[in-house]
Amino acid sequence: MDFGGARLCFNYSSPERGSLFFLASSDGEVAYADYVKPEHDDAGDHTKYMLQAHVAPIVALERSPFFDDIILTVGDWSFQIWREGHQTPLFTSGCANDYYTC
């Protein structure tokens, strides 16, 4: 996975989930990870899960200002709305005639 031009999205409103974050790649992938190493975990893998969200670079990754567990990704010809902890989007827009930008 290449994270060139990556986007980061932290949760600053929730102290118990403050070390968890989303990372979007230029390959259209989204990773959900924790920058704090779990206790008794020698593997050092901080990634909770990874998703192929878009087929082109993700140009925006934002947390909802109203619901702290809702995430927006924008890339290729669509945008998607995700819920933290779920590995499928709640909503995927229809395909646009051209690439979305932000």
Image (cartoon, rainbow, N blue to C red):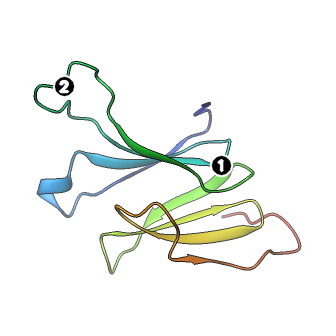
Q: Pinpoint residue 51: horizontal percent, then vertical percent.
A: 54, 50
Q: Which image quadrant is residue 12 in?
A: bottom left
| Left or right: where 92 falls relative to 89 | right
Residue at x 75%, y 59% (from the top left corner): 76
Q: Which image quadrant is residue 84 in?
A: bottom left
Question: In this rendering, is residue 101 above or below 70?
Answer: above
Q: Amino acid at mark 2?
A: Asp
User: CB under 8 Å between callouts 1 and 2?
Assistant: no
* Mark 2 element type: loop
Q: Pinpoint residue 68: horizontal percent, then vertical percent.
A: 30, 70
Disc 1 target residue:
28
Q: Quadrant of the N terminus?
A: top right
Disc 2 target residue:
41
In the displayed image of the protein, which residue is found farthest to the right?
Answer: 97
Residue at x 20%, y 51% (from the top left corner): 18
Residue at x 10%, y 30% (from the top left corner): 39
Question: In this rendering, is residue 39 above or below 70?
Answer: above
* Mark 1 element type: loop
